[in-house]
Image (tube, rainbow, N blue to C red):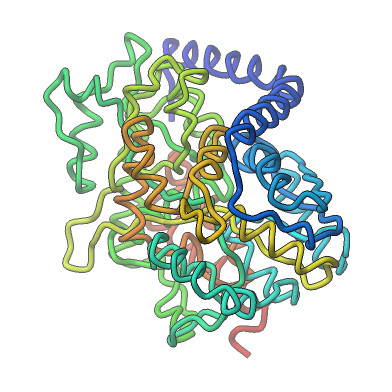
Amino acid sequence: MSKSDRDIHAYDNAMKRIRHHRKFEISRRQMLKGSAAALGATLAAQFVPKEVHAEVSGTIVHFASSGKRLSNSLRAVKPLFDKVFPNVELEVVSKPMTEALTQINTYMRSKSDAFDVVTQDHAQFASLDAMGALTNLDPYLERDSAWYEDYQGDVPENYRHMWNLPKGPAPPGWVAAVAPDGNAMMTFYRKDVFDKLGIKVPTTWDDVIEVAKEIHDPKNERYAYAAAMARNFWSGYQFYGALRSWGGDFFVDERNQDWTPACSTEEGFQSLSTLVELQKYAHPVTANAGEDEVNQVFANGTALFSPLSWGTATLNDPTYSDYHEHWHMELSPKGTTPKSAHRALAGGFGQFMPTWGGNRETAWAWIKFLNSGDREDLGGSPLIADAIVGAGGQLSRVSTLTRWADRKPFFVGLMKAYPVSVVNAPVIPEAYAIMGAVGEEVADAVNDDQSVEDALKACDKRIQRLMEDAGYYS
């Protein structure tokens, strides 16, 4: 797709900002570690635990992706945990997310006993299950029935059940992870721009196109639309989010194990055609963007809107964006057919105990503490959630989301998304490979390198080949 000189200039400016941001990533990461620990120490000074468990001891190692939302949230909670469990040595080990996601699977495939608790992206859990890496948490939860009842009552059912295995037509069988972290694909929009123009947040894909036309202002380097459309799994997720909203899916019937590919359908055509149309109003970084690049152009004010963007609390952080008060979130749009509905792709990171880990009782004490709510009679405290939110985390407990909603519009969006959430990828070990293959074909269509029809046929062929190689049809 041809670009004007102004678009190229905007792209160059955006990439310069992103490179500048990444140049200081390591030093900032060190600073954030210190900030998270300082926040935790400040909250710990106010924390008077109802009970102290000196009888629990040992060393536990928790592996998580680095950053505010994940490893720094753990570090912020640690000083509070230390007051309740003074004889536990807790170490948080982190790597950048691009490394951590794959390294976790490598460690688990080799049956490493290096970690007692691991935080991993939901889409990887089918692979972890196939490796035999996941511990059934049901016995621990049943032993703490009052605590578990509180957790179930506060975390929306749709989101809780994402972490249960095995999947299938019957209700999920056992709990593989619990997750204080929560996420969903939502509509992100600049409320100040929408209010000034008298525009309502679009609820259907037809409305999305009309809104993009109205707010697009490339002459002033303000682009209507941005999305993570890099030619890999990022584009795959954009397509899958749209496809689910039209009532489609990658397979004819995953729940009943009919693995016939189903991209080349009316739902697939509507979904991909819309993404192709939206590219006319896209910020120049969109074609090569992952989530970080999208958030950067949202933060600097050059992109105004996305109908499908992965949730992040950082846009409501005044240290990250001058527009932190103006970024609001709503349900992602739906199609206009009888099968269409608001279906928010839900994700997030769950904490599991590796099968080969060591100090399991102490590991469970740490997981339970992280996932506790506000009730002090159940070992919780509002300060635990405040440490996570203050460090940059995003929660699954509605009580915390509600308490922080006036300061974090993103949390309002999460509360709307959870009740209509659907799993963010097929629940099979091949999910990431499928998402990447589909993403390549989708990106080629969006960038006018092939037709919508050819792209959808190619998606089905590549899915078919991956499933054949994995033995699903034998």
Q: Is 183 or 115 nearer to us in this picture?
A: 115
Quarter of the image with the N terminus is: top left
The answer to whether residue 235 is above or below residue 214 is: below
Quarter of the image with the C terminus is: bottom right
Residue at image coords 17%, 23%: 195
Can residue 465 be spotted in the picture? no
The answer to whether residue 7 is above or below residue 111 is: above
Coordinates of residue 284 in the picture (x, y in percent): 46, 24
* Residue 353 placement: quadrant: bottom right
Coordinates of residue 45 in the picture (x, y in percent): 63, 32
Can residue 59 be spotted in the picture? yes
Q: Residue furthest left?
A: 198
The answer to whether residue 11 is above or below residue 42 is: above
Coordinates of residue 369 in the picture (x, y in percent): 62, 55
Residue at image coords 40%, 78%: 252
Residue at image coords 43%, 48%: 238
| In this picture, residue 386 sits left or right of residue 137 | left
The answer to whether residue 72 is above or below residue 318 is: below
Q: Is 40 or 434 nearer to us in this picture?
A: 40
Coordinates of residue 384 in the picture (x, y in percent): 56, 44
Q: How many marks on residues? A: 0
